């Protein structure tokens, strides 16, 4: 199984959209995908028609055993989505109570890694949607993954958020054997605005080695897909947004092969 995390310490930058778009395209290619919602807001969970405010069982349950994960529990928590190849490990609002704990002291930093290890045979791919806060959940997402996708909204304030995320990553890398490879993905790009063009230029200058050279455009079809509860590529496989995400997936898969060879 390949595990990707999608993270940025900022909300509204396209994390959930990116997670679901990539998962949908992997499923279209015949892969079995588990998507993990670690954001207490539960947008990914709501996207597929489950209510994070009323779910009795969720990824929160995994954190209730002092850092151990009971055998079979991750499987029991999975919910269906509109795509038969995609299973959801849902979020619930209770997850918010974990955020305040210090990741180092709680011993809960590897709960998601251990949970995914139990799902290794059942899925080809995992995509983790992360919360916008640096806490136990973000640490879990990064510790469990082999590749990180950082969506960055192409507007002026976004670069600050990206700096914070890259600093967080440097801190996390100190406790990993190998640095976590990451790819910066410009999102919500609108070529008519100065903010979009200007931000793209800054990203190209500041992060040449980690920037995906294209961008995800503003595309209302992505919003329509979320309203319909369908993956973007099922909803409209030829929309501009989906074409961009298809190119992104190709790039991420090639990065992965490069990392394996190196
Ligand atoms: N490329 C895009 N074009 C148009 N709307 C988008 C695009 N990406 C995301 N959105 C919309 O913007 C909002 C925030 O996106 P979301 O993926 O939920 O961000 P995050 O998970 O980072 O908070 C959502 O309503 C989503 O449908
Ligand atoms: Mg989100």
Image: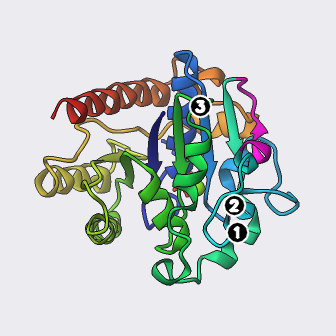
Secondary structure type for disc 1:
loop
Answer with left or right where residue 211 lies relative to residue 22: left
Q: Give x and y (percent) for residue 239.
A: 51, 23
* Residue 78 located within the stretch drawn in magenta: yes
Contact? badges 3 and 1 (CB < 8 Å):
no
First in sequence: mark 3 or mark 1?
A: 3
Secondary structure type for disc 2:
helix
Q: Where is residue 227, by image quadrant?
A: top right
In the rendered view, tell whether residue 152 sits above or below residue 33: below
What's the CA distance linking mark 3 and mark 2?
19 Å
In the rendered view, tell whether residue 244 sits above or below residue 46: above
Q: Which residue is mark 2?
A: 62
Q: In this orientation, which residue lies closer to the viewer: 262 or 96?
A: 262
Instruction: Indicate yes or no: mark 2 CB to ligand 2 under 8 Å.
Output: no
Q: Where is residue 58, by image quadrant?
A: bottom right
In the rendered view, tell whether residue 62 sits above or below residue 181: below
Q: Which residue is mark 1?
A: 65
Answer with left or right where residue 250 lies relative to residue 77: left
Count of numbered circles in the view: 3
Numbered range of the magenta stretch: 75-84
* Residue 11 located within the stretch drawn in magenta: no
Q: Residue at x 22, y 55 (%)?
A: 198
Answer with left or right where residue 46 lies relative to residue 32: right
Q: Residue at x 75, y 34 (%)?
A: 81
Instruction: Indicate which label's residue lies in the foreground, 3 or 2.
Output: 2
Q: Give x and y (percent) for residue 201.
A: 17, 51
Q: Which residue is mark 3?
A: 33
Classify the position of the C terminus by image quarter: top left
Secondary structure type for disc 3:
strand
Instruction: Indicate yes or no: mark 3 CB to ligand 1 under 8 Å.
Output: no
What's the CA distance linking mark 3 and mark 1?
26 Å
């Amino acid at each position: 199984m390949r595990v990707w995390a999608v993270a940025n310490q900022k909300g509204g930058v396209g994390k959930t959209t990116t997670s679901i778009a990539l998962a949908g395209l992997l499923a279209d290619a015949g892969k079995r995908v588990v998507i993990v919602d670690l954001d207490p807001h539960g947008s990914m969970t709501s996207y597929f028609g489950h209510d994070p405010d009323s779910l009795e069982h969720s990824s929160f349950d995994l954190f209730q055993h002092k850092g151990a994960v009971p055998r079979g529990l991750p499987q029991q928590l999975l919910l269906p989505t509109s795509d038969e190849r995609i299973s959801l490990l849902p979020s619930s609002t209770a997850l918010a109570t974990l955020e305040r704990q210090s990741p180092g002291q709680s011993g809960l930093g590897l709960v998601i890694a251990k949970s995914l290890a139990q799902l290794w045979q059942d899925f080809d791919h995992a995509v983790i949607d992360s919360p916008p806060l640096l806490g136990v959940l973000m640490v879990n997402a990064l510790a469990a993954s082999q590749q990180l996708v950082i969506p960055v909204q192409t507007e002026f304030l976004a670069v600050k958020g990206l700096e914070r995320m890259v600093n967080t990553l440097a801190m996390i890398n100190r406790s990993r054997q190998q640095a976590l490879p990451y790819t910066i993905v410009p999102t919500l790009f609108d070529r008519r605005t100065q903010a979009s063009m200007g931000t793209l230029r800054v990203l190209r200058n500041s992060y040449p080695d980690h920037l995906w050279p294209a961008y995800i455009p503003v595309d209302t079809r992505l919003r329509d897909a979320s309203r319909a509860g369908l993956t973007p590529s099922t909803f409209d496989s030829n929309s501009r947004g989906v074409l961009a995400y298809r190119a992104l997936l190709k790039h991420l898969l090639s990065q992965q092969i490069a990392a394996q060879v190196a």
